[in-house]
Amino acid sequence: MTQHTLFVCILCCSSEIDQQQTTSNAGQVLFEHLSQSFASSDSCEAIRLHPVRCLGACSHACVVAFAAPNKLVFILSKLSATHSVPDLLQFSGQYVACSGGKVPFQERPDAIKKGIHAVLPPLPIEPKRWALQCEHLSP
Ligand code: FES
């Protein structure tokens, strides 16, 4: 089975999260919400959440990236740490199901349509090598 990965920057900061009320920054809050939602969703079994320390779009928090061997890479930014979770969950299922990751624009949830930061062409990479490369990105 193809390994799909949702990278989530856990260092992103946003004024959305009041840091006087929590020690977590927005990226960490988003990652925790996604972890809880993925754990209770059957449709997300085929995609792995992977925390990373920066995706290079720091002034556009929160930032995530969908990637898989031989599929488009979607980098999404300006995501709400709390409100974007249902849309990210929906898109996760669409991304896994669509050949080449080519989820038709009209079918994408609103947070995905508005949050596109970049879309990269697929990297021609074997699933085994992909899994090894993801292991090296752990925070
Ligand atoms: S800190 Fe999140 S993208 Fe850099």
Image: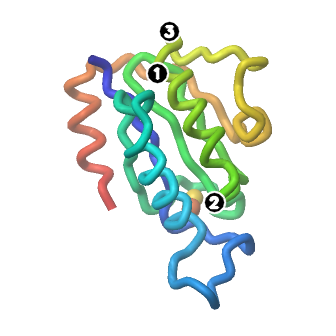
Residue type at numbered disc 1: Val
What is the crowding at mark 2: few (fewer than 14 residues within 10 Å), some, or many (at least 20)?
many
Residue 33: x and y in percent read 51, 57
Quarter holding the N terminus is: top left
* Marks 3 and 2, how far apart at CA: 28 Å
Taking the spot 50% from the left edge, 9% from the top edge, the residue there is 99
Which image quadrant is residue 53 in? bottom left
Residue 35: x and y in percent read 42, 52
* Marks 2 and 1, how far apart at CA: 22 Å
N-term-proximal mark, 3 vs 2: 2
Q: Which residue is mark 1?
A: 96
The reply to whether discs 3 and 1 touch (Cβ–Cβ < 8 Å) is: no
The reply to whether discs 2 and 1 touch (Cβ–Cβ < 8 Å) is: no
Q: Which residue is mark 2?
A: 81
Residue 28: x and y in percent read 50, 66
Which disc number belongs to residue 99? 3
What is the crowding at mark 1: few (fewer than 14 residues within 10 Å), some, or many (at least 20)?
many
Residue type at numbered disc 3: Ser
